[in-house]
Image: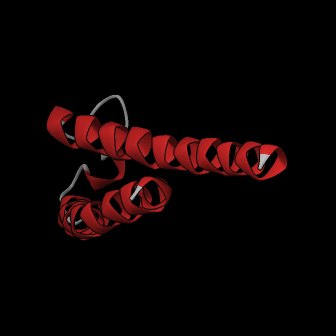
Amino acid sequence: MKRFRGPLLMVLSVAFNIPLWFYYQGLATEARKTPFGSEFGSVAWPPRLWFTLVKLSLAICFITGLVLIVVDWIEWLNARKHA
């Protein structure tokens, strides 16, 4: 299971990010139909805080998955060299 923790974390973060991305695109499309729609996502009309925090946590999970893949690969190389 140790070898699967990095890819598993990356797949889970992408799988949770896809529905969130579709929700955000729908929200952005509806917001741009309003008179001040061009301001959506800017300082004048920022996205909701919870959305920003979820995106940040998913990005951190994805990067952690990449780091775990590299760490597991280095451990595998060291075990192979010493075996």
Instruction: Report the number of numbered marks.
Output: 0
- Along the line of sight, which residue is nearer the eye, 34 or 42? 42
- Along the line of sight, which residue is nearer the eye, 8 or 14? 8
Counting from the top left corner in percent of width and height, residue 12 is at 31, 62
Q: Residue at x 24, y 60 (%)?
A: 24
Question: To which quarter of the image does residue 56 belong?
Answer: top left
- Along the line of sight, which residue is nearer the eye, 30 or 50? 50
Q: Residue at x 19, y 32 (%)?
A: 49
Q: Residue at x 77, y 53 (%)?
A: 80
Q: Residue lying farthest front? A: 83
Q: Residue lying farthest top? A: 43
- Along the line of sight, which residue is nearer the eye, 10 or 55? 10
| Placement of the N terminus among the 4 image quadrants | bottom left
Q: Is residue 24 above or below residue 63?
A: below
Whether residue 19 is visible to the viewer of this picture, yes or no, is: yes
Q: Residue at x 25, y 62 (%)?
A: 16
From the viewer's perspective, is 21 left or right of 59? Answer: left
Q: Is residue 49 above or below residue 63?
A: above
Counting from the top left corner in percent of width and height, residue 48 is at 17, 38
Counting from the top left corner in percent of width and height, residue 36 is at 25, 49
From the viewer's perspective, is 80 left or right of 57? Answer: right
From the viewer's perspective, is 29 left or right of 50? Answer: right
Counting from the top left corner in percent of width and height, residue 76 is at 68, 51
Q: Residue lying farthest right? A: 81
Whether residue 46 is visible to the viewer of this picture, yes or no, is: no
What colour-coding does the image apply? secondary structure
